[in-house]
Image (cartoon, rainbow, N blue to C red):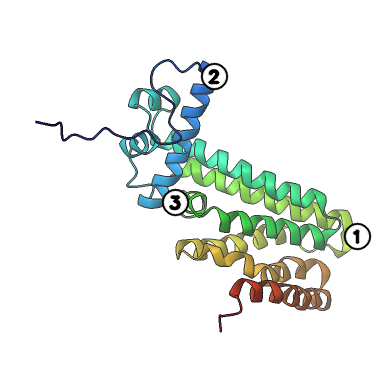
Amino acid sequence: MPDSRKKRQREPYQLPAGRHGLSRQFVVSNQRERILAAVADVCSAAGYAAMSVEDIVVTSGVSRRTFYDNFSGKEDAYLAAFDAVTQQLLERVGAAYAEADGLVAKARESLAGLLSFIADEPTFADMCIVEVMAAGPSAIERRNRTMTAFAQMIEKAAADELPKSKLPPQLTAETLVGGIYEVVYSRVLQGRGDELPALLPDLLFSVVLPYVGQETATSLLKNERRRSKPRAARQAGPGDS
């Protein structure tokens, strides 16, 4: 009788079995990256609470021994994955911030980088924004540090441009970042993360208002909405109503 058992196909990201001539360093790095990617995939699909080491092992295509050679358990793996993603996010936002000139431009480009990253990476967004609340105190502390980094960007841009007498209270930037987080969280939770870039005009208005005043912020809001309309029309296409 023919053997009805099917061989499990090797995924594109898996290394070939046996002697492959790859360095030990490359193999270890590849395995670790696969585990971190699997954490994001499983966490997004099942949630942190339901995620198990077995889920991560199966999804990544590594052995349990390889998993435990790298991590002590699922929390350790989650924290490493969270750190890797937030580093990517901070690098993107930080680059946009550094290239822009002035408070308003820095706020705009940083926000645009943040919103586009979250929209482009729904799996990472689920893991880092929604599931972080279930992952425990260490994960929440990491989230808070990331939010503090964003608040410090706003504070520095404002301090570099405005006289000290014109600066709003110290908690302003922290409050603004907290509000943006809630907006982002609600959209990601509802599976609407792709809508976030369209919120740039309104969020930018909220960020700059305490620093530049109502008149300038309102003018900026109108300009941003005009700027975004042609892009929205192009995305809709000529056949859409």
Q: In x, y percent, where is residue 172? A: 71, 62
- How would you rate the neighbour count of disc 1 (Cα within 10 Å): few for under 14, some for 14-19, many for 20 or more? few
Q: Secondary structure at mark 3?
A: helix
Q: Residue flagged by tag 3: what amino acid is it?
A: Glu
Q: Which residue is mark 2?
A: 25
Label located before the other in sequence (1 or 2): 2
Q: Which residue is mark 3?
A: 131
Q: Secondary structure at mark 1?
A: loop
**Residue at image x 39%, y 24%?**
66
Q: Up-down: is 188 above or below 35?
A: below
The quadrant of the picture occupied by the C terminus is bottom right
Q: Up-down: is 121 above or below 68?
A: below
The quadrant of the picture occupied by the N terminus is top left
Give the distance between the C-alpha atoms of the residues marked 1 and 2, in whole angstroms: 52 Å
Residue 172: numbered disc: none
Spot the residue most to the front.
1
- How would you rate the neighbour count of disc 2 (Cα within 10 Å): few for under 14, some for 14-19, many for 20 or more? few
**Residue at image x 79%, y 57%?**
106
**Residue at image x 75%, y 62%?**
108
Query: Between 158 and 121, which is closer to the camera in this rendering?
Result: 121
Spot the residue most to the bottom.
241
Look at discs 1 and 2 and give the one toward the viewer.
Answer: 2
Residue 163: numbered disc: 1
Q: Secondary structure at mark 2?
A: helix
Label located before the other in sequence (1 or 3): 3
Spot the residue most to the right.
163
- How would you rate the neighbour count of disc 3 (Cα within 10 Å): few for under 14, some for 14-19, many for 20 or more? many
Label located before the other in sequence (3 or 2): 2
Q: Residue flagged by tag 1: what amino acid is it?
A: Pro
Look at discs 1 and 3 and give the one toward the viewer.
Answer: 3
